[in-house]
Image (cartoon, helix red, strand yellow):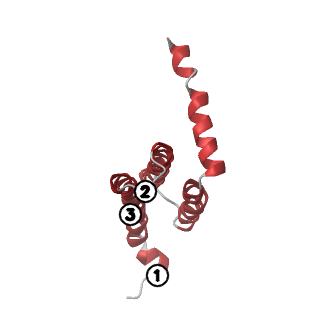
């Protein structure tokens, strides 16, 4: 029973590896936003455990939604290579999910920055 679940891991790893090598959108999110998150974590250090977890959760949400968006686009392009309004709407909705996840990441980072304004810029009083 347990081996059935573990036998599925190679499929997931293969999908992530494929996206990392072949999908520009996923690579951009993985490396570009990943570098941004690492810089934020170091600039704002020390962070509490919950602050680190919220930041990593938001970043992971971006990666998950980008993988889903990319998978949907690949499948729809294969099924309907011609332009179709409904297909375009589906792709736009998936891209919207990525945008919402990205905005959530910015809100988390903005909240961290706002809570440290006095530390970053010093006290002016």
**How far apart in space, not on screen, are marks 2 and 3 (Cα)?**
29 Å
Residue that numbered label 3 is attached to? 103
Q: Nearer the viewer, mark 2 or mark 3?
A: 2
Residue that numbered label 1 is attached to? 122
Q: Give residue 44's mark.
A: none
Asked if residue 71 is positioned above or below residue 59 in the image, the reply reads above
**How far apart in space, not on screen, are marks 3 and 1 (Cα)?**
28 Å
**How far apart in space, not on screen, are marks 2 and 1 (Cα)?**
55 Å
Q: Nearer the viewer, mark 2 or mark 1?
A: 2
Q: Give residue 83's mark.
A: 2
Q: Secondary structure at mark 2?
A: loop
In the foreground, 26 or 55: 26
50 horizontally vs 42: left or right: left
**Of callouts 2 and 1, which one flags the residue occurring earlier in the amino acid sequence?**
2
Q: Residues within 10 Å of mark 2 (few under 14, many from 20)?
A: few
Q: Secondary structure at mark 3?
A: helix
Instruction: Return the x and y of residue 69 as percentages of the image width and height.
Output: 45, 50
4 horizontally vs 103: left or right: right
Residue depicted at 59% across the width and 52% down the height:
23
């Amino acid at each position: 029973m347990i081996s059935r679940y573990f036998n599925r891991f190679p499929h997931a790893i293969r999908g992530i590896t494929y996206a990392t090598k072949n999908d520009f959108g996923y690579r951009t999110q993985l490396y570009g936003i990943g570098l941004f998150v690492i810089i934020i974590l170091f600039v704002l250090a020390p962070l509490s455990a919950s602050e680190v977890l919220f930041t990593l959760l938001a970043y992971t949400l971006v990666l998950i939604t980008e993988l889903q968006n990319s998978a949907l686009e690949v499948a729809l392009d294969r099924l309907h290579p011609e332009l179709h309004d409904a297909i375009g709407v589906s792709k736009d909705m998936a891209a919207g999910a990525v945008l919402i996840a990205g905005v959530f990441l910015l809100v988390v980072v903005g909240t961290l920055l706002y809570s440290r304004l006095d530390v970053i810029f010093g006290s002016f009083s």
